[in-house]
Amino acid sequence: MRTAAVVGTGLIGTSIALALTRRGVSVYLTDTDESAVRTAAALGAGLVGPPPVPADIAVLAVPPGRIGAVLAEQQARGLAHSYTDVASVKGGPEREVALSGADPSVFIGGHPMAGRERSGPLAACATLFDERSWVLTPSAHTSRQTVNRALETVALCGAVPMLMESGTHDRAVAVVSHTPHVVASLVAARLEHLAPEAAQLAGQGLRDVTRIADSDPRLWGDILEANATAVAEVLGELAEDLTVTVAALRGLATDDADERAQGMTLLADLLGRGLRGRRRIAGKHGTPTATCQPVRILIGDQPGELARLLAKASELDINIEDMSIDHSPGKPSGLVELMVAPASALGMAERLKDCGWRVQRVPGAARPTGPAAATGTPAARTAA
């Protein structure tokens, strides 16, 4: 691939352009927003305007409802030999392409499974797609050459391609992406009128649950509209679980022993299903993150402290699978959780302690009992 065109220079479009430019592809940028396209160009994402001759492939980074019209328009202009899109819904755009009068043989649906809470070209990153899944949904009309060009685009962006049927894709993302966003927004909405002193009690768990609610409402309105049926089905199943859960909790608040017992049974079933489902989420090597072991270290809030910790982990030849930071509100410290292979966890914790790091939890250590647990020392609180 020598040339590519990107239509739409928001977060995803600009990130794709940056990734392709990094690999030596000449990229041409267009957008109805002059400020966005010039910002993307200033970041090094490519040149403003159409290519002098048709590009090898054009990426349509526009809302789902506009894919068909934009494809027909750009095909008429001869923008590229092949086309793909990045919309998070595939069935609707595929149908619109068929009705738009565009040539469906040179189009393949695409959806990179990556993003950020921020939007716009300034949030773009050339490494956004590294090792992330990128779904391609060829239709019955898509040519082999178009499939190959799309596969090369995915590879150049550092992502991992997955071929799926559009309907299968839409049902999958309803569960793993769209419904979680709705649920995060519903939980975050409970905070809108929360008293300030109550909001001060928020910890990392609430931040994790509501993180994705911090997104563009207009963009997500378009996404949910495009996949409304599949999302409604998943939310309907969730509503049934919520109804059972509310009844179980109300049963626990009664004096009736049978109702309390039934409530505990229902809650145990729900929490157990949640645990089993959580463990199906794959980590960076395709294995569930539940197979990893956390090592928790308290660090000070000063420049270079986190970098020093990660440098020490590298020096100990420990591969970190994942990482999170729980900031302490109003305190100059934070709790860093490093996820590592179980075989490495205990040794890593002990070696970090020997080097002076404040390890808050030694993997495999027994929970504290007696005075330490009763007085709520840091060790007791961490174990809890």
Image (spheres, rainbow, N blue to C red):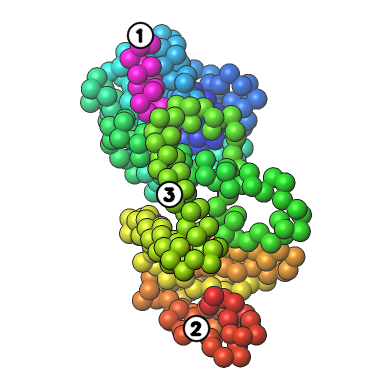
Label 3–label 1 contact, CB within 8 A = no
The residue stretch that appears in magenta = 78-101
Q: Residue at x 63, y 30 (%)?
A: 39
Q: Using the image as rendered, state which of residue 170 and residue 121 is in the foreground.
A: 170
Quadrant where the image shows the N terminus: top left
Check disc 1 and report the residue beneath it.
Answer: 101
Q: Amino acid at mark 1?
A: Gly
Q: Earlier in the sequence, mark 3 or mark 2?
A: 3
Was residue 93 drawn as part of the magenta stretch in this picture?
A: yes
Report whether residue 319 is seen.
no
Which residue is labeled 3 in the image?
241
User: Dot 2 corresponds to which residue?
Assistant: 367
Of the numbered discs 3 and 1, the one sitting upstream in the chain is: 1
Distance in Å between CA atoms under marks 3 and 2: 33 Å
Q: In x, y percent, where is residue 218?
A: 59, 29
Q: In front here: 344 or 211?
A: 211
Mark 2 and mark 1 lie on one chain; the one further toward the N terminus is: 1
